[in-house]
Image (cartoon, rainbow, N blue to C red):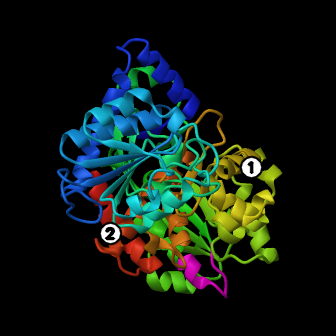
Amino acid sequence: MRQAYDVETVRAAEQALMARVPEGALMQRAAAGLAAACAYALGAGAPAGPGPGVYAARVVVLTGSGDNGGDALYAGARLARRGAAVTAVLLAPQKAHPGGLAALRAAGGRAVTPDDVDAVALVHRADLVLDGIVGIGGKGGLRPEAAPLAETAHASRAVVVAVDLPSGVDADTGEVRGAAVRADLTVTFGTYKPGLLVDPAAGHAGAVRLIDIGLGPYLEGTPPAMEALQHADVAALLPSPGAESDKYRRGVIGVVAGSERYPGAAVLAVAGALRAGAGAVRYVGPGAAAVLARFPETLVSAGPPRKAGRVQAWVVGPGLGDGPEARRSVEDVLASDVPVLVDADGLRLLDPSVVRARTAGTVLTPHAGEAAALLGVAREEVEAARLDHVRRLADAFGATALLKGSTTLVASPEPGVPVRANPTGTSWLATAGSGDVLSGITGSLLAAGLAPADAASVGAYLHGLAARIAAGPVGAPIAAHDVADALPDAWRGIRS
């Protein structure tokens, strides 16, 4: 499990650790890990391919004030001792870390200011640019003097390495409120920060490498702000049939989806449910003929949902439309005493008071536009502050909220529970019908007995991993049914 802590918690843990180690030891640990990561990036591990190696490499350190700049300067000194030509551009000369600056000069590096040299040209010619401009406490975008350097670094051939997190992004929220560094690699210390797990900030981080500096014992007992499941976590949650299993023990899911205009939504939701391990699927809606043609094992019903037969969870909404019949179906499903997932058209028909009054779990799965409509805000606001809005959704409806997008987030309505960021997926997943498959997957996991937040998290993980498998190692266009078809391979990969 990857866990991310907010800045206040990280600062407190650092202070507790620094009280027990020699002065400067923590910074030296960080600098050593950072320099090693830079050396790797300059060699065969460079994101753009084999690099020049450390010896004679042109390294530019963009240095601000405080400890973040100190980490960068000490790392630059280590690279200079290995033969790199290191130049530090001091963006706050009077506030540069004195120990780091002395170490760099002693190692043969040089320090300049933007007034001394053409810093933009210097960055343009670099093999590696080390971003030590702003630390984890920074708010807002880069200052005007730093923004052109960040832009040049991104446009150049240099490997851009961010110290702890890219300068200009918000560590706690993942928001980017102005110009910010776009890194190929972010080397973060002690623990992940929320901004490294959620877009838009995560899109600026590139690959992320965590350096252990000893904070672990000082974070124990404090709930993280965010977390991200990994294969082992998902494997522990995946349901597995036993010798005595039957379809009800495996989970029977009811699907209310599709319409005369969108029968394919029903087919895709049922595909997700069946491929994600449902013991049986009961389908209610006008897409029965299309569903049976593709999946003859489906149990179809003319409705209403309450008369369809026994189920252990419902999925309602994909392709449903917004007419009177659709509204009655949503109301009928929400009146049940089993977990319910509401997606797509069903979201427009929700009454928050009805959702909050339910005793069984509810999962809402909007994309940014649907979330904006539910909260009464602009879509751009949701996309700019995804973490804040997924929490608001969960709180407003008293339900688990799965906010789909470039970073899919899952928030529980329970206080103090970390938001989960999904680490799988691919941009090829942005295709019509993929959300319908996700609904079926997650609904199947609800029917199997997973708690709402676990079902949503595991569903998103499987969905993203299946899309990666379908798209292939170099990436290729995929359709929603390809994602459903790849689910068994994703499941096996996690289990193995």
Is 262 contained in the magenta span?
yes
Residue 237 occupies quadrant: top left
Q: Tell me if residue 304 can be seen.
A: no
Furthest toward the front, the residue is 116
Answer with mark 1 or mark 2, whichever residue precedes in sequence: 1
Helix, strand or loop under label 1: helix
Q: Give residue 173's mark.
A: none
**Residue closest to the eye, 464 or 123:** 123
Question: Residue 278: x and y, percent?
Answer: 45, 61
Marks 1/2 in contact by CB < 8 Å: the verdict is: no
> Quadrant of the image for the N terminus?
top left
Helix, strand or loop under label 2: helix
Q: Which of the two discs, 1 and 2, sits closer to the camera?
A: 2
Type of amino acid under label 1:
Phe
Q: Residue at x 78, y 68 (%)?
A: 328
Furthest toward the top, the residue is 20
Q: Which contiguous range is marked in magenta?
A: 257-267
Tell me if residue 242 comes above or below residue 22 in the rendering. below
**Residue closest to the eye, 27 or 176:** 27
Give the Cα distance between marks 1 and 2.
Answer: 34 Å
Q: Residue at x 63, y 52 (%)?
A: 401
**Residue closest to the eye, 328 or 495:** 495
Q: Disc 1 marks which residue?
A: 397
- Callout 2: 10 Å neighbours few (<14), some, many (20+)? some
Type of amino acid under label 2:
Ile
**Residue closest to the eye, 276 or 300:** 276
Q: Give residue 469's mark.
A: 2
Q: Tell me if residue 273 can be seen.
A: yes
Question: Residue 118: x and y, percent?
Answer: 45, 59
